[in-house]
Image (cartoon, rainbow, N blue to C red):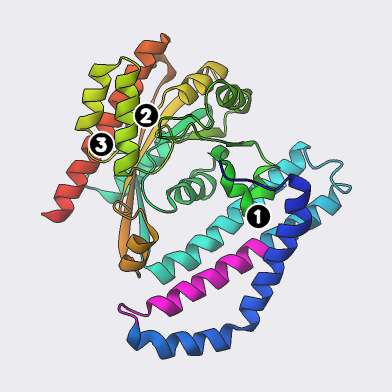
């Protein structure tokens, strides 16, 4: 498990370092831009190096601006005295929504990314979009379970929830993201949990009962406009993770489930513990399953570098399952969750063959 500095050290060291790095990168923009343009002929691709350096600069400035804005909110809250009150939590949600909108506007234009959301398989774009909005219709709390495939898919989902469907996400994410000052501060001021995943090798380095208790606490009290966000696979799909997950299923005596997991091509067998905890803590919540295509195959930094600029269209598909259709028995619910990920796998496969054909 990667070492993480304590909170006080991250606040007094990492946050100022991020602001300083952003200012330095901005001041050196003319220099690095000239160097990057000069090296463009040596680097294959369409201005890959200038694009990467520009995106790094934008992200650093974005992160630094968020840190400064949240410092101002901290002062306004009485130096943190009222920072947990509903008004300041809502202010942080609004700040996060605007920040995500800005980030996607810049990254989308530089990387040439488009995002299409759909709640049906109808060919009519307007009808598909209307169906997507209906999936997230307000009035009932939601548990949103998404596949985890490709860089930035969690950012895309959170951006969609905040800015497209008006949901307030409660987010489960990996503890190492606390190295990013803006993410660290923001998500400690709105409902969220940083967790240590259970790992994919023979030794468990986290997860288990403590994580499930934390997720149950996070899901408790979901409001009609809230969305509890979880990635049941536990990480992006890689060959080693797939094999480790299958091996663990066999070691636990679930041979039939292991055989089904071997048949999955695009997703991994989901881990049901987090979903159990969330659904038990939020007995009135419906479930929304999320699939997406467009970032498949982008696992390593080399993959991402090779694809720049991406010129990709990302399609996000959503299905809503009413609470009455969700099993109460834990074993039946685990099978139900696996069935849905098998359906997601099939949907991705059909989309991939259609794109290739």
Rendered position, 170 above or below 99: above
Q: Is residue 300 left or right of residue 154?
A: left
Q: Is residue 39 left or right of residue 339?
A: right
Mark 2 sits on what residue? 270
Q: CA distance from mark 1 to mark 3?
A: 33 Å
Q: Main secondary structure of the magenta part?
A: helix
Q: CA distance from mark 2 to mark 1?
A: 29 Å
Can residue 124 be seen here? The reply is: yes
At mark 3, the secondary structure is helix
Q: CA distance from mark 3 to mark 2?
A: 12 Å
Q: Farthest residue to the top: give it.
A: 329
Mark 1 sits on what residue? 182
Q: Are marks 1 and 3 in contact (CB under 8 Å)?
A: no
At mark 1, the secondary structure is helix
**The disc label shown at residue 345, or none:** 3
Is residue 59 magenta-colored? Answer: yes
């Amino acid at each position: 498990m990667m070492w993480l500095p304590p909170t006080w050290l991250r606040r007094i060291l990492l946050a100022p370092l991020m602001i300083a790095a952003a200012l330095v990168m901005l001041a050196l923009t003319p220099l690095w831009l000239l160097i990057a343009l000069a090296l463009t002929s040596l680097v294959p691709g369409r201005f890959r190096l200038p694009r990467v350096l520009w995106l790094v600069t934008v992200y650093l400035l974005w992160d630094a601006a968020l840190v400064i804005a949240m410092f101002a909110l901290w002062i306004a809250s009485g130096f943190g005295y009222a920072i947990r009150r509903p008004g300041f939590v809502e202010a942080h949600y609004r700040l996060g929504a605007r920040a995500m909108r800005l980030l996607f506007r810049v990254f989308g234009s530089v990387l040439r990314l488009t995002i299409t959301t759909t709640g049906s398989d109808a060919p009519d774009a307007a009808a598909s979009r209307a169906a997507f909005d209906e999936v997230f219709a307000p009035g009932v709390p939601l548990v949103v379970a998404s596949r985890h495939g490709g860089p930035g898919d969690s950012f895309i989902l959170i951006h969609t929830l905040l800015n497209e469907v008006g949901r307030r996400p409660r987010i489960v994410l990996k503890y190492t993201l606390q190295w990013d000052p803006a993410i660290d501060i923001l998500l400690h001021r709105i409902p969220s949990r940083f967790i240590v995943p259970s790992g994919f090798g023979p030794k468990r380095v986290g997860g288990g009962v403590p994580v499930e208790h934390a997720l149950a606490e996070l899901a408790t009290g979901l409001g009609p406009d809230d969305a509890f966000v979880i990635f049941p696979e536990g990480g992006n799909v890689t060959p080693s993770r797939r094999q480790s997950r299958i091996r663990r299923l066999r070691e636990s005596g679930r041979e039939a489930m292991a055989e089904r997991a071997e048949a999955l091509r695009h997703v991994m067998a989901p881990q049901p513990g987090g979903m159990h905890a969330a659904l038990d803590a939020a007995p009135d919540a419906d479930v929304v399953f999320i699939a997406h295509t467009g970032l498949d195959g982008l696992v390593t930094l080399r993959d991402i570098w090779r694809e720049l600029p991406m010129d990709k269209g990302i399609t996000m598909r959503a299905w809503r399952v009413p609470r009455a259709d969700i099993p109460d028995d834990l074993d039946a619910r685990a099978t139900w969750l696996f069935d849905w990920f098998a359906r997601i796998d099939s949907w991705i496969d059909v989309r991939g063959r259609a794109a290739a054909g």
